Amino acid sequence: MLLLDERIRSDGAHSRTWASCEQERLQIRDDEGAAGELAVAIVDQVMRRYGRPLDEGIALDGESLACGRYTLRRLRHRAAVDAEGRDYLVWERPGDEPLVCVAATATAALRFLMDRFSREVPSGI
């Protein structure tokens, strides 16, 4: 299980979002009880949309989660312009450069899509 993001809710409580992967499906759950899954292809689209190429000088360390032929990694990094480090998600793609995105941004997009797809009701017959 990989911690994607940790945030402070309006009531002051901490809430974390976690991910696990089974074959080509990313399961997402949070401390508030929301849970669902997304196809790895959707995660790839989110990271292509919001991610940027990872600077070659940044080491790929930190916790990771294998998702089929992809790897999702959580990385803590402090850029020269930051007072303190930030959490990032790195999407490692076969045969292509890794993409990086602020963890809160990527997680918010994944949570939105998870919620959206879980509310859709398949059309009958």
Image (tube, grey):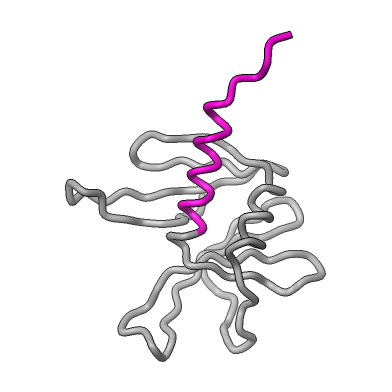
| Vertical comparison of 29 with 67: above or below | above
- Of residues 80 and 16, the one drawn nearer to the viewer in this rendering: 80
Residue 59 counted in the magenta span: no
Q: Nearer the viewer, residue 39 or 66?
A: 39
Q: Which image quarter is the C terminus in? A: top right
Q: Position of residue 38 (x, y in %)?
A: 62, 41
Residue 124's spot in the image, x, y percent? 68, 10
Q: Which secondary structure dominates the residues rendered in magenta? A: helix
123 w.r.t. 71: above or below: above
What is the span of residues highlighted in magenta in the rendered image? 106-125
| Residue furthest out toward the top | 125
Residue 105 x, y percent position in the rendering:
47, 60
Residue 46 image-quadrant placement: bottom right
Query: How many numbered discs?
Result: 0
**Above/below status of 123 relative to 59:** above
Residue sitting at x 51%, y 58%: 106
Q: Quadrant of residue 48?
A: bottom right
Q: Residue placed at 76% from the left, 56% from the top?
A: 69
